[in-house]
Image (cartoon, rainbow, N blue to C red):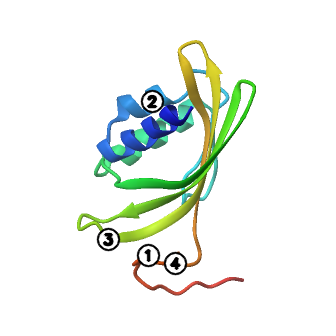
Amino acid sequence: MREANERFYESLRLGDLDRMIAVWSSREELCCVHPGWEEPLVGRAAVVDSWERIFAHGGKVHVESEDEHVVVAGDTAIAILIEEVYDGDGVVVGAAQATNVFVREPGGWFMIHHHASPLLRKRAGRSRPPGPVTLN
């Protein structure tokens, strides 16, 4: 399962739509919540379309995953982790808490859900531009 999770992040770093689509299950029941997007995406067509739009506007996203914790329950696996986003100079410009859900199908583990929410606090030891945070 960890290999499937790494393939997800590798497809982001490469900006490779075909690799991204191959990470996801071929079933219709998929969900995705991108950080900063207003609505969750439900259904295969909506999820694939979102990745097409993301990769069409610059492609590669340098994201590294860390602090990964995995829970496997039968044919379902959940990975919770931190995503750190870097600029072209290797400086952390953002971070998100992410949850990736996979199912075991013929051929291996495939993603059925991805949810990433921006972290609202600076992580210890990380350089990141300061910015105001308003909680209402």
Are discs 4 and 3 less than 8 Å apart at CB?
A: no
Alpha carbon separation for disc pair 4 and 2: 34 Å
Mark 4, residues whose alpha carbon is within 10 Å: few (<14), some, or many (≥20)? few
Q: Is residue 76 left or right of residue 110?
A: right
Alpha carbon separation for disc pair 3 and 1: 9 Å
Q: Please state, as top left, top right, bottom left or bottom right, where the N terminus lies in the image.
A: top right
Which mark lies nearer to you, 4 or 2?
4
Quarter-wise, where is residue 64 in the image?
bottom left
**Which residue is under mark 3?**
91
Amino acid at pointer 4: Ala
Where's residue 96, x and y in %? 54, 62
Quarter-wise, where is residue 26 in the image?
top right
Asked whether residue 36 is in view, the answer is: no
Where's residue 12, x and y in %? 38, 45
Task: Work out whether residue 2 or residue 49 is closer to the camera in this orientation and state it.
Answer: 2
Quarter-wise, where is residue 114 in the image?
top right
Upstream in the sequence, badge 2 or badge 3? 2
Which mark lies nearer to you, 3 or 1?
1
